[in-house]
Amino acid sequence: MLEVVPVPVLQDNYVWLMHDSASGETVAVDPSVADPVLDEAGRRGWTISQVWNTHWHPDHTGGNDAIRAATSCTITGPAEAEKVSKLDRIVAGGDRARIGEFEAELIDIPAHTAGHVAFHLPAAGVAFTGDTLFAMGCGRLFEGDARQMYNAMQRLAALPLETRVYCGHEYTLANGRFALTVEPDNAELVARMAEVEAQRERGEPTLPTTIALERATNPFMRASSVEELAKRRAAKDAF
């Protein structure tokens, strides 16, 4: 089993540390900054051997160079991430990455950025979706369009239902409040929001989510057409 732990940074970002005890490898996924990530790895006795980036935005890549300088790790990500730091390996959908014996399949999910990818590790039941799929939400359409986001939602919805999804931000409470305006009579959504509110009151992360939860409660994954997703995204932008 892989161990995945959050490192909360900045205002609402999560950097994910993924550790494979068999190989001793540790991957930092989307490190916004370096010091808290290095500190948490050190506290656990882990040495970061790789960085994986899902997209280029600096709040997901800003710690790359300092982590590499401290650990001699390799950095893997889509070509667009070279806007921020030099990559050791450039990847796109269909490529593979590894941590120990666990293989990650890369999935193209552009829309938030043009080259955004997800890392799906089927054997571990884990996916890292960056800023495309959030708990009860999706990313803003900065470099893509609603059709791309709709297609990305469909690709991710096709993953096994039990897949644990680790995304880049603690947006769940705000996303859920919007979701309730779209589907106020969705009983699963109402129940989930009660749980999320309690989690946040206790100061707990609301992640990971699962594909099953998102299929049941995420208004963007549940959109029946490109047009419906576009309408919902525009409404969320103004919410």
Image (cartoon, rainbow, N blue to C red):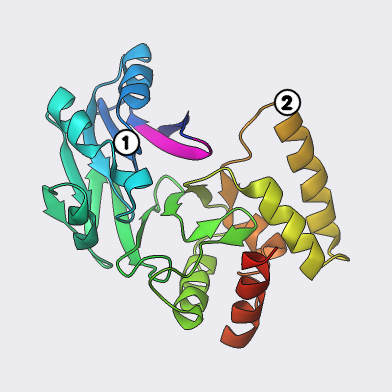
Write the start and end of the magenta stretch as one range. Answer: 11-18
Q: Quadrant of residue 188?
A: bottom right
* x and y, in percent, of residue 142 in the image: 43, 68
How many C-alpha atoms fall within 10 Å of the one at disc 1: few (<14), some, or many (≥20)? many
Instruction: Decide if residue 58 is on the left or right side of residue 16.
Output: left
| Mark closest to the chain's N terminus, 1 or 2 | 1
| Residue that badge 1 annotates | 28
Q: Give the structural element (helix, strand or loop) at label 2.
A: loop
Residue 94 point in image, percent of width and height: 26, 67
Picture layout, residue 150 above or below residue 97: below
Give the crowd class for mark 2: few <14, some 14-19, many >=20 residues within 10 Å. few
Q: Is residue 199 visible?
A: yes
Dot 1 falls on a residue whose secondary structure is strand
Q: Which residue is mark 2?
A: 202
- Could you tell me which quadrant the C terminus lies in? bottom right
Q: Residue at x 78, y 48 (%)?
A: 193
Q: Main secondary structure of the magenta part?
A: strand
User: Which of the 4 image quarters holds residue 71?
Assistant: top left
Front in this rendered view, residue 21 or 168: 168
| Above or below: residue 24 compared with residue 129 | above
Identified by mark 2, the residue type is Arg
Residue at 78% across, 69% down: 182
Looking at the picture, which amino acid does disc 1 mark?
Ala
